[in-house]
C-alpha cells in the first residue's frame, strides 16, 4: 500500500482522549456499564403475527399484522432503574391484628345499595289474573240439593239421638211410666190406685195396684211393637171417660198412637172394634 494512503487513513481516525481527572474516569465507567446492558437491535425486522379479530370493516382502522420495532426493544431494566428500585423500600405487610381504617358511611352506603341492586335477580312482570271460570247453573242447583239432603240426614240423626237421650233421662231402660189415679177400684182420693206401664222387649204391659194394694195387683197386656228402635219407645197412661158411662177409662199412648181400655166391672178391658168412643187429647 502507498504510504500516503496510510497517512491519510491514520489522520481520519478519531483520537481517543484519555481522562485527565477522577470525575471523568467515573463517568466513563458509568457510561460503559450502561452500554453493556443495552441490547443490540436486530438488523432485520421480525414479523410477529397475532390472532386478532378482523377489523377491516371498522371505520378508520387497518389490520395490524406486525409489531413495531419499539416492541422489540428489551424490557430489561437499566442500571439507573435498578438503583432507584433498590432505594425504594417495599411496602410493609399488613397484619390481621392491625385495625382497618374507618370507612366513611356516607360513601359506603351508596356502594352497598349499588351492590344490592346489581345482585338482586330480575323479577318477571306479574301475569294478568285469569278470569274465573263460569259454571252452568245446573251444577249450582245440584250442589244446593246435595247440601240440603246431607243437612237433612245429619239433622235427623242428631234429633233422634237427642230424643233418645231425653227418654233415657225421663223413662230409663226398659221404658217405665208410673201414675196414680182414682178409678173406682177400692180406692179413694186419699188412697188412689197405682199404675205402672212397661215397654219390656217391645211388649207393652200395664200393672194396676187397686187402692195401692200390691196383693190385688192386675196385669193388662197391651200391643206388641214392631219396627226399628221400638224397644225404646216410651209408654204413657192417661184416664178419661171415652164411652160416656161416667167412669174413667184408661188410655195407653205410644209415640202418638192411642189404645183404649174400658173401665167395666171393677177392671179394664180392651175396647171392641166399632165401639163408639170420644177422646179429647189434652
Image (cartoon, grey):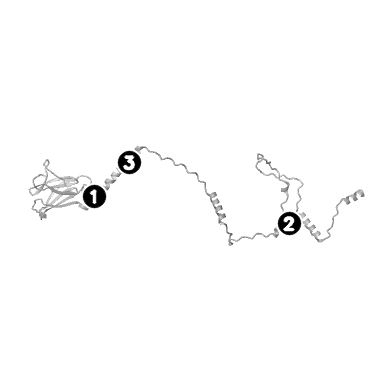
Residue 172 visible? The answer is no
Q: Secondary structure at mark 3?
A: helix
Percent coordinates x, y for residue 120 in the rendering: 52, 49
First-in-chain label (1 vs 2): 2
Name the quadrant containing residue 243.
top left
- Which residue lies most toward the bottom here? 97
Determine the secondary structure under disc 2: helix
Local packing at callout 1 (Cα closer than 10 Å; few below 14, some 14-19, many 20+) is some
Label drawn at residue 144? 3
- Asked if residue 154 lies left or right of residue 72, the reply is left
Residue 116 versus residue 220: which sits nearer the camera? Answer: 116
Residue at screen point 32% across, 43% down: 147
Residue nearest the viewer, comparing 87 with 222: 87
Q: Which residue is mark 2?
A: 80
- Name the residue located 35 percent from the left edge and 39 percent from the top edge: 140
| Residue 122: image tag | none
Q: Is residue 188 left or right of residue 81?
A: left
Q: Say if 276 sits above or below 8 in the image.
A: above
Check if mark 2's residue and mark 3's residue have beta carbons within 8 Å: no
Amino acid at each position: 500500500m502507498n504510504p500516503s494512503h496510510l497517512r491519510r487513513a491514520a489522520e481520519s481516525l478519531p483520537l481517543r482522549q484519555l481522562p485527565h481527572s477522577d470525575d471523568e474516569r467515573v463517568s466513563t465507567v458509568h457510561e460503559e456499564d450502561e452500554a453493556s446492558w443495552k441490547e443490540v437491535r436486530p438488523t432485520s425486522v421480525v414479523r410477529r403475527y397475532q390472532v386478532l379479530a378482523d377489523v377491516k370493516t371498522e371505520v378508520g382502522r387497518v389490520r395490524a399484522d406486525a409489531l413495531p420495532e419499539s416492541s422489540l426493544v428489551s424490557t430489561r431494566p437499566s442500571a439507573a432503574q435498578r438503583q432507584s428500585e433498590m432505594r425504594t423500600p417495599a411496602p410493609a405487610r399488613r397484619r390481621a391484628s392491625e385495625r382497618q381504617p374507618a370507612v366513611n358511611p356516607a360513601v359506603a352506603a351508596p356502594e352497598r345499595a349499588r351492590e344490592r341492586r346489581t345482585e338482586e335477580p330480575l323479577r318477571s312482570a306479574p301475569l294478568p289474573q285469569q278470569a274465573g271460570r263460569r259454571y252452568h247453573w245446573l251444577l249450582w242447583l245440584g250442589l244446593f240439593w246435595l247440601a240440603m239432603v246431607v243437612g237433612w240426614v245429619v239433622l235427623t240423626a242428631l234429633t233422634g239421638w237427642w230424643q233418645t237421650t231425653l227418654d233415657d233421662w225421663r223413662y230409663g231402660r226398659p221404658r217405665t211410666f208410673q201414675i196414680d189415679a182414682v178409678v173406682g177400684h177400692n180406692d179413694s182420693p186419699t188412697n188412689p190406685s197405682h199404675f205402672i206401664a212397661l215397654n219390656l222387649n217391645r211388649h207393652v204391659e200395664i200393672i194396676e195396684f187397686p187402692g195401692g194394694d200390691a196383693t190385688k195387683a192386675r196385669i193388662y197386656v197391651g200391643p206388641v211393637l214392631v219396627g226399628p228402635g221400638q224397644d225404646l219407645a216410651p209408654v204413657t197412661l192417661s184416664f178419661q171417660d171415652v164411652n160416656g158411662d161416667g167412669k174413667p177409662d184408661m188410655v195407653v199412648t205410644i209415640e202418638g198412637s192411642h189404645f183404649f181400655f174400658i173401665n167395666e166391672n171393677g177392671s179394664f178391658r180392651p175396647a171392641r172394634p166399632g165401639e163408639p168412643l170420644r177422646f179429647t187429647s189434652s
